[in-house]
Image: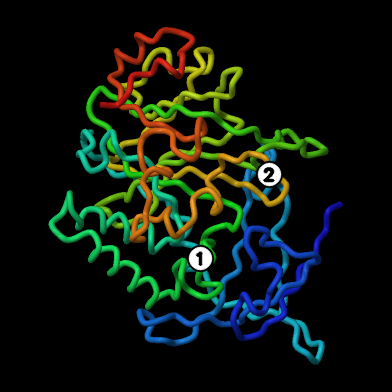
Amino acid sequence: MRHYHVVFDLEMGNAADLNPQAMRAPEFRAPGNRRVGGPMAASGPTGQGVPIPSILWLRYYAPDLGTGPLAGIALPKVLLRLNTGETFWLQADKSEMVRRDTCPIAGQESKPIDPPPIIGPDLGWFKMFDGFTMYAEGWGIQQAKPWGNRPIEQVRREIRGERACFYNRGPDQTPPGNLTPGTTLVPYITYLTRPTAIGVGKGLVFTGRLPTTPQTRQGEATMQPAELRYWSLCHAGHGPQGRYRGVLYGCIMDDEIAVDRNRDYVIVLSRPENKPSNARPECGVTWQNRGPEEPQEILIRWLSVYPDHASNPYVPTDKLVPWSIGSWSEDAYDSNLIGRNSPGVMGPYHPVLHYVIKQNFEALGCPVDPGKVPTWK
């Protein structure tokens, strides 16, 4: 059996000071199963400054096939223990929260649209440093020149100021504000994101090289060495009337992706009626149903646990793509890192986007050579 017992000593204070080893980049780990956590958190200016309960996140990645989302194991039990030894748990009525979290949301039916120039063939990827920065930079690019009419320096300064005020975060802040893992983000995961749109009769094609990952979904007894722990590509929209963030239309993970002898992949996203006849594993192609909504966001996860998976120098970690020059809202932002739709510091592992008419992709034959997929112009 693999029983575990984790203890959080509840103290108020700076998380980095309370956990000096476990909150140090790039390791973000320390021996033992004991950490220090705050029982409450400040809600900041938007929450009137009142304290709110802290949240504990428990994530499951790639459970064994057929075992369900919890891998066939019951959820862990959580207890509060006082200094006197009394142990108990106070459970609030969370039925309404559960109902909202688990109710299905219908996808938004919208017409296919070709991507506007702002998200066209030159745009590469944004690295996600936290949720606020991701959404703020998406807004900022539309506001700033050349796409908007505001000076880019002004827009960037505004984003940085709001982020520092509301969340005390940024590459120049003191720890933990300058640590890239933020709320909802995993310390070892690098997230790359990009908006996309697909028009009539077309598909979005991704080419690149997939790092090696351990095979763990068939109940394997041991985990083999690999370059990454986990890799996935997901696409999501905003649902009816744009009311929701992250209505998921599909995800595909590393062991579901067809690769050639060099581990190069070809992934096609399209609506079913636009699926090319050669978009199938036998031709070295992985196809995903795009879903009914346009536009959508693409999110790629690179899970690289330190130091187990530190052998691939092209994984877009903070070392390769640091916050100070890898974030669009920084004055020193360098689009040559990952911001262009061509390999930068990630080399062959950079996911390159192609926008292809169905018939033109079918003309590539079977098997499909990743190097011959037409360049997006």
Q: Which residue is most to the right?
A: 1
Q: Is residue 34 left or right of residue 130?
A: right
Q: Comparing marks 1 and 2, which lies closer to the viewer?
A: 2
Tag 1 residue: 183
Relative to 322, say whether 116 is above or below: above
Judge by depth and name the residue closer to the eye, 35 or 7: 35
Instruction: State the residue at coordinates (20%, 39%).
Output: 116
Q: Which mark is on residue 192?
A: none
Give the amino acid at mark 1: Thr
Instruction: State the residue at coordinates (43%, 74%).
Output: 167
Q: Which numbered disc flags the more N-terminal residue, 1 or 2?
A: 1
Tag 2 residue: 309
Relative to 264, say whether 132 is above or below: below
Judge by depth and name the residue closer to the eye, 169 or 219: 169
Q: Residues within 10 Å of mark 2 (few under 14, many from 20)?
A: some
Relative to 339, say whether 135 is above or below: below
Instruction: State the residue at coordinates (33%, 73%).
Output: 161
Q: Which residue is most to the bottom?
A: 84
Residue 205 at x, y percent in the picture: 38, 27
> SS at mark 1?
loop
Q: How is the image coloured?
A: rainbow
Q: Which residue is most to the left?
A: 149
> SS at mark 2?
loop
Judge by depth and name the residue closer to the eye, 92 or 373: 373
Q: Quadrant of the C terminus?
A: top left
Residue 231 at x, y percent in the picture: 57, 40
Q: How many marks?
A: 2
